[in-house]
Image: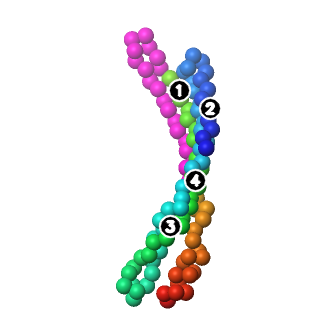
Amino acid sequence: MRLGFDIKFLKNRLGLSATYFQYIDGPRILPNPISPTTGYTTYYLNALKTKRPDLNFQYQADLIQTANGINWDVLVNISTFQDRYTETATWSTNLWQLLYY
């Protein structure tokens, strides 16, 4: 899902853009450490789901524009990207520990 808008003012010399998106990924492979006495150090579960929301603001300004083509533009970008875990396989981890420990 992605939502956004883009607004320009003063003959496109000032601008504001905002975007929100949410990306859900998974299940991904999750490495879990186990006792080395089993002969292995890690086992892998296909069990990790993540949600990645982002709110992104972008400010743009054309500070200097001359007739001979010299321009000075400024762009500021602020982002709140996060990677949140929404689901892990705790039942699989507990079952593995009961069977092999």
Q: Is residue 47 magenta?
A: no
Q: Residue at coordinates 40% horizontally, 18% vertically from top-left? A: 70
**Going by the picture, which residue comes out furthest to the left?**
39
- The amino acid type found where label 4 is placed reads Ile
Span highlighted in magenta in the image:
64-82
Q: Is residue 44 above or below residue 82?
A: below
Above or below, 87 against 77 in this view is below
Residue 91, image quadrant: bottom right
Query: Which quadrant of the rendered structure holds the N terminus?
Result: top right
Task: Indicate the amino acid at tag 1.
Answer: Ala
The three-letter code of the residue at mark 2 reads Phe
Q: Earlier in the sequence, mark 4 or mark 2?
A: 2
Q: Position of residue 78 (x, y in %)?
A: 55, 42
Label of residue 24 in the image = 4
Where is residue 9 shown, x and y percent of the image? 61, 21
Task: Label 4: state its secondary structure.
Answer: strand
Image disc number at residue 35: none
Precedes in sequence: disc 1 or disc 2: 2
* Residue nearest the observer in this picture, 73 or 32: 32
Q: Which mark is residue 5?
A: 2
| Mark 4 and mark 1 residues within 8 Å of each other at the beta carbon | no
Q: Give the Cα distance between marks 4 and 1.
A: 34 Å
Q: Which structural element holds mark 3?
A: strand
- 4 vs 1, front mark: 4
Residue that carries the numbered disc 3 in the rendered image: 46
Establish if 9 lies above or below 43: above
Q: Residue at x 43, y 85 (%)?
A: 35
